[in-house]
Image (cartoon, coloured by chain):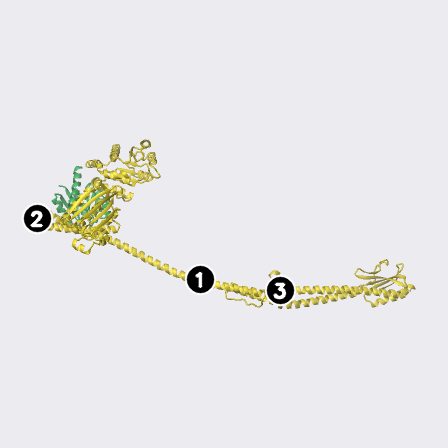
Chain colours: A yellow, B green
Amino acid sequence: MNFHNLSIKRKLTLITMLTSSAALVLSALSFLIYDLVSFRHLLIQDLRTQAEIIGYNSAGAMEFKDVPAATATLTALTAKEDIVAAVLYTVDGKEFAHYSRTNDAFPKVLPPVSQALGYRFDGGYLQVFHDVTLNGEHLGTLFLQSDMRQWSVRAKRYGGILCIFVLVSGTFALFVSSKLQRLISRPILHLEDSMREVSVKKNYEVRATKSYGDEIGRLIDGFNTMLSEIQHRDGALRSANDELKTRTLELEKEILHRRQTQEELLTAKHTAEEASRAKSTFLANMSHELRTPLNAIIGYSEMLDEEARESGRSENVEDLRKIQSAGKHLLSLINDVLDLSKIEAGKMGLHLEDFEVLPLIDEIVTTVQPAAAKNSNEIKLHVSENVGFMRADITKVRQILFNLLSNACKFTDRGTITVDVDQNDRNGFIRFRVSDTGIGISEKQQQNLFFEFSQADASIARKYGGTGLGLAITHRFVQLMRGQISVESEPGKGSIFTVQLPTQVVLDTTKVARSAAANEGEASPAGSKIYQDTILVIDDDASVRDLMSRFLSKSGFRVVVASNGEEGLRLAKQEKPLVITLDVVMPEFDGWSVLKKLKSDPALSDIPVIIVTIVDNEPMGLDLGAASYLVKPVDRDRLAVLVEKYRMARSVDRPHSMPSAPGAKKPKRQTELKSIGDVHHADDLVGRRQ
Amino acid sequence: MPTILLVEDNEMNRDMLSRRLQRKGYTVIAAHDGEQGHLLACSKSPDLILMDISLPMMNGWEVTRLLKSNESTKHIPIIALTAHAMVTDREKAFEAGCDDYDTKPIEFSRLSEKIENFLLAKKLS
């Protein structure tokens, strides 16, 4: 096992034990070495002393060459266990006497006498050479050899003691250190336990117990501080989380509530739409149901009236007229209600057509004349000279003016009703002003005047009759045609109603084209299907498109319009028109490019193209293949002659492709062509705008 | 005198209109529903048809479509008479093939002028 991964307890124990044991062993070893070294010195000293004594004792024997005495002296060495051998040499180096403890202890080769005096170690033995002298005379040399038995015994014994001592003291050190290591390891282990509890159980309330004021104690303090900080934050986090949960729950409830509300609203909306549809259907049905008997009432009374007059029985005529007028009044009320419901349902459409304003005014004035006469009112008419044609929904214009005039007649007694009509060429509006000298309308009443079912005063309904719908409808009609209506009045002095309508009421492009086609059908109902020759008008200017389609459809053509080159090309392919009129200056794709494209397409290259432009560059147009070139403002007569020419050319080219036109059609078309001159007012206006 | 076929389900209107037309000198044959109107148009070849639109059995649009798709009757001018006067009625009328269209209650002078125009055109052709 790796030491590094041992538990701190073991590490501490081991460190302590090893440290103390090492110190112990070192000190014991140094002591042992010292002892053995000094003991050897002692042994050397002792051997030299022995040598001195033996040398002294054997000097006599040497003097007298008494070998047995010398040998006896040497044999005394038996008492000394260490000394294994002793030899006496004569001066000339010959052996005189010797001693050996055992046979094998005696050295095989005796060291030569010539050796230096003193001690030396040789082969594990201590050897001493000593001079034998007597009265200063050198007699020979003594050699002693010791096997240092005492020393090795002592070394062995001391080594054993040392081992036992180290073992015992090591065991003791282990015991002590294992007890003492707790001082350090216990707080650390406790800290570890606390940390484990925190990390495993996420219990931030645990605190480690501080035992001592040492570093570990401070560590524990820091740990506890950290824990309480975490606990605090955890608490804050938890409460924030709880709050978040509560809020989320509330939010979900809110969302649910809103969704429910939304669904309810949607249901309510559907219900309301359903109800509105039901209302429209109901009104349509009701109007039908009401009109059918009215049809009979008015019809029969008219018939009886005619019969009565023819047969000269005039006594009933007056009553029959009353029935008729009551029937017609009822009819107008039904129509009012129906109109209003149609406007509210967004189903009121505009049928635009061109008409002359003056005859319309005359017609309306004639119609209200009886009402004016009833209250002895005089109607004055001022129509300014520049008033000519306008393009609008004639039925609605008629109804607007009729409503204003009949109101004026109704609320004026023996007074004057003035109708002023003039046209503002700058802003393209035509203004109708109906002023009377009647009872007038107070300022407060004026505010509600144009709203449904709000006559100026409830008593008015009793006195003058009416539904209170007339002005509301008038107002809505004016709005539909993008005009304005206003009133000025002073009670007792009279009222002035002013209506301003665009001279050219327009819908969007596609609707204009469609209604132009519809108008064509209306203008000549019996033969509308015969004039199917189509002319494609390509021009980016809406007013030019409008003007051209108006004029051309009047001349009996079906007109298709395109507001840009691309659309023009598409329609040319789709419609295969008889003639194309083409503007040059257009954004993106100009007329020249359109012309080139038309002429390069074999399917379209035969279609004559009339350039209608403000750019005076006829040679270029003709070079590119245009059939004719007209410079704006367009000369209507020339255009009429041109298109007629192409129509004739086509019917000559392809007689079978033309439907057989009844004789009645031709004169009619020609009269229309002649009547182009009448359109000059409107033309001038548009021409200037170009 | 020209013959006019009047297709109208309301008895009073039928009676009133036919009498007024007769007083103008036209021969009037009347039908009270779409089917009868179709049969009479085919068998009697009238000079003009006044066609009410809300009819039992077969409505005015359908009768008009049938008559206009038939070679022998398609030349007969048809004037639709509708009480609805909705924007779509007018478009429907022309779509179905009606030659003209008038709203009820009928203004007799206007209607008789239309009739005269059609008959005159027919005579000229």
**SS at mark 1 in the image:** helix
At label 3, the amino acid type is Leu
Q: Which residue is mark 1?
A: A240
- Of mark 2 and mark 1, the one earlier in the sequence is 1
Q: Is residue B40 visible?
A: no
Q: Calculate the distance from the C-alpha at mark 2 to the C-alpha at mark 1.
A: 99 Å
Mark with earlier residue (3, 1)? 3
Residue at image position (29%, 43%) is A510
In the picture of the structure, the residue carrying the numbered disc 2 is A314
Cβ atoms under marks 3 and 1 closer than 8 Å: no
| Residue A256 in view of the camera | yes
Question: What residue sits 36% from the left and 59% below the top?
Answer: A256
Depth check, mark 3 against mark 2: the one in front is: 2
Residue position marked by numbered label 3 in the rendering:
A12
| x and y, in percent, of residue A230 in the image | 50, 63
Q: Secondary structure at mark 3?
A: helix
The amino acid beneath tag 1 is: Ala
Q: Nearer the viewer, residue B112 or A347?
A: A347
Residue A401: x and y in percent read 20, 47
Mark 3–mark 2 contact, CB under 8 Å?
A: no
Q: Quadrant of the C terminus of chain A?
A: top left
Q: Is residue A546 above or below residue A56?
A: above
Q: What is the spatial separation of the Cα atoms under label 3 and label 1, in whole angstroms?
A: 47 Å
Q: Residue at x 76, y 66 (%)?
A: A154
Parent chain of label 1: A
Task: Indicate which disc, 3 or 2, sits on the residue closer to the N terminus.
Answer: 3
Q: Nearer the viewer, mark 2 or mark 1?
A: 1
Please, is residue B25 above or below residue A455 in the view?
above
**Local crowd at mark 3 within 10 Å, few (<14), some, or many (≥20)?**
some
